[in-house]
Amino acid sequence: MTGLLTRPYEAADAAAVADLMNLIEERAGGHPGHTRDEIESLLAGLVRDPAADSRIVVGPDGLVAAAIVATPPAGGFRVDVLGGVHPQWRGRGIGRELLGWQLARAAEIHRAVAPDAAWEVHAGAYLGDRDAIRLFERLGMTPARYWFDMVAPTAEPPAPALPEGLAARRYSAADEKAVHAAHMEAFADHWGYQRRGLDEWATLTVRSESFLPDLSLLAVDGDEVSGYVLSYRDADPTRVYIGHVGVRQRWRRRGVAGALLGAVLTAAGRAGYTSAGLSVDADSPTGAVGVYERVGFTTTSRSVNYVAPLPPAATAR
């Protein structure tokens, strides 16, 4: 990377990193929805030591590449590596060098934190990003899970009713602890799940500057949160991003998610948004893809998670 400056991520880089990720994803067929606030929350919630766990590559005209390594939460197993290379700078070995560093750094964190546990490194890309996919495979990663990006219009969405005994209400700051507990239960059987403590989870979600409490709804059974939809700002001011949809196990398959989504789409339309987007596991154990389709969502693009194992130290020897 001769002639380029490589340094750790700094807080002032958030907007440029969001722009870089949006450019990469749009070129690959995805939606350019990342915001500065989202990047700030991700770094605050996932990266333990920015000086050691991030690299920013800067060229004469601005940001060339970014690479971030996220330490798993306590008891976790998944090291997420994030970032990418500007399309105009590809083919020069920058991506290979950065991903190689990310894999090596993930192994260092594994040895320092939980050497006797089996961990994994996860990296994602849109299916249209053939450069990234070739790089993942070249460095020994294998495809493990596919995802759908979906979008729905906010005009005249279906309005299914909640099951008897449940009521819907808007999220408030006082709900933080209850929604965290509901989320940890709702996602416990999902692929790649890692339990996070309240503060870490809230930093990534309801304490983020991108969070939209007025477009986030809860289904409640008395004082218990049975289901929830949490919404966030998108880089497109006409679109709202639905970042989290969950239903506790004993309330599943009773129409809770569909009813909340219909209500959120209606509220988003009244607030001036014309569409809503979300991302979903193509093999979701809850049948989420069908739920979303029934309230008007259609698939617009597909992405894939690649995985590399970090075996326990005894196995590695």
Image: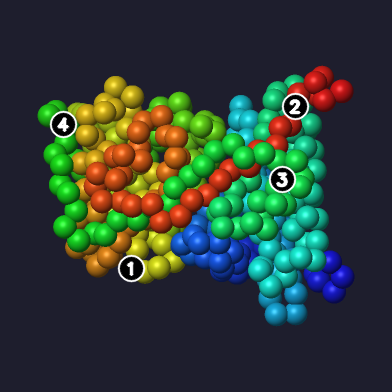
Q: Give the secondary structure at mark 3.
A: helix
The amino acid type found where label 4 is placed reads Pro
| Label 3 sits on residue | 137
Q: Give the secondary structure at mark 2.
A: loop
Q: Residue at x 72, y 52 (%)?
A: 135
Quadrant housing the C terminus: top right
Q: Position of residue 15 (x, y in %)?
A: 56, 68
| Label 2 sits on residue | 311
Q: CA distance from mark 1 to mark 3?
A: 37 Å
| Label 4 sits on residue | 163
**Picture colour scheme:** rainbow
The amino acid type found where label 1 is placed reads Thr
The amino acid type found where label 3 is placed reads Glu
In the picture as drawn, the residue positioned furthest to the top comes out as 314
The answer to which image quadrant residue 247 occupies is top left
Q: CA distance from mark 1 to mark 4?
A: 31 Å
Q: Position of residue 74 (x, y in %)?
A: 61, 30
Q: Residues within 10 Å of mark 4 (few under 14, many from 20)?
A: few
Q: Is residue 181 in view from this perspective?
A: no
Quadrant housing the N terminus: bottom right
Q: Is residue 252 in view from this perspective?
A: yes
Q: Earlier in the sequence, mark 3 or mark 4?
A: 3
Q: CA distance from mark 3 to mark 4?
A: 46 Å
Q: Nearer the viewer, residue 251 or 282?
A: 282
The amino acid type found where label 2 is placed reads Pro
Kindly identify which numbered label has been placed on residue 238. 1
Q: Position of residue 68 (x, y in %)?
A: 67, 52
Q: Residues within 10 Å of mark 1 (few under 14, many from 20)?
A: some
